[in-house]
Image (tube, grey):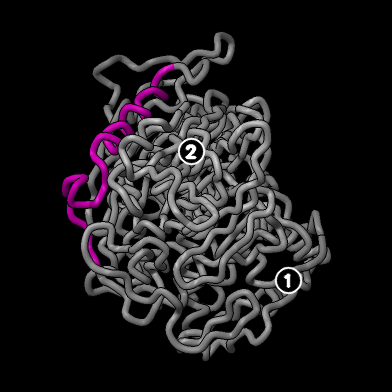
Amino acid sequence: MTERARRDGWPSRRAFGGGVLALGGALMIGAVPGAAAAEGPGAAAEGRRPGAGSAARRTTLRRGSAERAGLLAPHLDGLVAEAERFLGPSPTHPWYAGAVLLAGRGGTVALHRAIGSAVRYAAYDEKTDTGVELPPERQAPMTEDTVFDLASVSKLFTSVLAVQQIERGALELEAKVTAYLPEFGGGGKQDVTVRQLLTHTSGFRSWIPLYREPTREGKLRLLWAERPANPPGTAYLYSDLNLISLQLILEGITGLGLDALLHDEITAPLGMHRTRFNPPLSWRPEIAATEDARPPWSGLDRGMVHGEVHDENAYSLGGVAGHAGIFSRAWDLAILARTLLNGGAYGRARILSPASVELMFTDFNTAFPGDEHGLGFELYQHWYMGAMATPRTAGHTGFTGTSLVLDPTTDAFLIVLGNSVHPVRSWRSGSAPRVATADRLARAVPVRPALGRTPWFSGMDSGTTGTLTLPPVPGAARFACALWWDTEPGTDTARLEASRDGGSSWEPVPFVTERPGEEPRRHPDGAVSGWSGRVWHRLTAELPEPGPFPVRLRWRYTTDKRYVGRGVYVDGARVLDASGLPLFDEARPADASRVEAVGWTRSAD
């Protein structure tokens, strides 16, 4: 892969905060498209962009019902049940000892629940692969206010601090890192840019054992001498070293430590009172324990880690690091989520301009499909965002079992904080509870019918094939309906098919879709997959000539066994003759009763 071309006309550092924004090579002056979102539950209209524009909201959080949040209560309740399944074998050991779940939309936190244990084990017995449980009186249940070691979710805070400095003119996005850290250029890193650090395209390998060097100077020598695994800008490779380097830049240009910057620029203005590096001893009863850290699975021999940072490199850096080390609770992270969805403001505080937030939700890694990344935020990652994933859904995970997902399209946010390395990291694999809970929250956001009261819905099951088949109609010439889809791109596909032999064989039917305000889009293979903008599309299709039997139509939706999107909806299906008269109209009860559905159901939402 070749290096992504630099964006033409990138604004100067002074112009950055003044309404000039470069997106995808185009220079935009003035308000970002999709400016202020509407107020009220689920304030984002479908297809709009909260977090952008000149008139940003300052919505603050309050607890409320699912209805007040514009969410469907049964599916939101199912989120907790999904999470509780992973307190048991998943598949062999529990995925986590416990977790705190928080979900909301707009300014309403509609779910905030603690499950399981914050502290359960005294140690890990590697001989029997079991956890040594503490006596019941020394165990601690999860509470809504339990504080977690965020691990790599800390990277988001470092990124926000960096974007603040870009906005203020002290840091340039396209500048070389050596402009701020001259020693950084060793090992062939002289061309690495600040943007590449923020988007993990610098060429750094994932990590190096800085903790083996006893002094800070020794750790820096390792970093300066590190050679890129790939030429800068030619590949995506997630690396802790990017954010450690960014920390050094920030501390150099501000003269403040990262912990002081975190407090002064983010947590104090926003009132995030349980978010900091190096929590004091008085917080320990409120903190979830992490791992019995001992070789060979850990680089350091520390025993059960509780109240100190789990990551070895962050620990060796005194607990303050750009890639890990921040402790926080679910409500504080919800404030950060709301701030970003508001466009950088929360109540009376503003920490970023709307244009700066827009950059955090804009994909800079278009040269590396599948590794979409804004400034600091990962984008469109089904492997932990589940059905909440859209091209603008932003988030991050942490090795200790934490995650944060923001969906600007629906104005929804999900926080899952688990202690999944308690008692040992090998018990946890994958991101199944993150996906399961995100799927539930995505399903809780209603899709309102386009035409009737109850469109046909494909469902959201993985590893299935469902069909929605219309009755045969003599003289059929054209098909029309409203179509809404959001599927895992490339793997989960809805196909329009026709049979001319009574259903023995099926062939694709090309069609055209059109959404408001856009040019019609042709689908010559008769299929849709991926993201459609969370809006209804008008679909029309010319039907093939009949064969031995009248033409019969069906929708066939197939999902793989891994991840799913929000699914597919079909509304107002009509089959017309050559003059445009309806031969089949789903709005007519007699016609609707002849539809054959396998795996599809009627759904008002």
Mark 1 element type: helix
Residue named by callout 2: 400
Q: Are marks 1 and 2 in contact (CB under 8 Å)?
A: no
**How dense is the environment of label 2, judged by Cα within 10 Å: few (below 14), some, or many (20 and up)?**
many
388 horizontally vs 268: left or right: right
Foreground mark, 1 or 2, reads 2
Q: Nearer the viewer, residue 497 or 75?
A: 497
Q: Position of residue 235 (x, y in %)?
A: 75, 58
Residue that appears at 63% across and 70% down:
195
Mark with earlier residue (1, 2):
1
Residue that appears at 49% across and 50% down:
576
**How dense is the environment of label 1, judged by Cα within 10 Å: few (below 14), some, or many (20 and up)?**
some
Mark 1 vs mark 2, CA separation in Å: 32 Å
Q: Position of residue 67 (x, y in %)?
A: 19, 47
Q: Quadrant of residue 516?
A: bottom left
Q: Amino acid at mark 2?
A: Thr
The magenta segment is 59-88
Q: Quadrant of residue 215?
A: bottom right
Q: Position of residue 56 (x, y in %)?
A: 32, 75
Is 271 a magenta residue?
no
Residue named by callout 1: 183
Q: Nearer the viewer, residue 588 or 337?
A: 588
Residue 392 seen by the camera:
yes
Mark 2 element type: loop
Q: Position of residue 290 (x, y in %)?
A: 44, 33
Relative to residue 16, is residue 230 depicted above or below?
A: above
Relative to residue 460, is residue 167 depicted above or below?
A: below
Instruction: Give the position of the N terminus as an image quadrant.
Output: bottom right
| Total numbered badges shown on the rendered structure | 2
101 horizontally vs 5: left or right: left
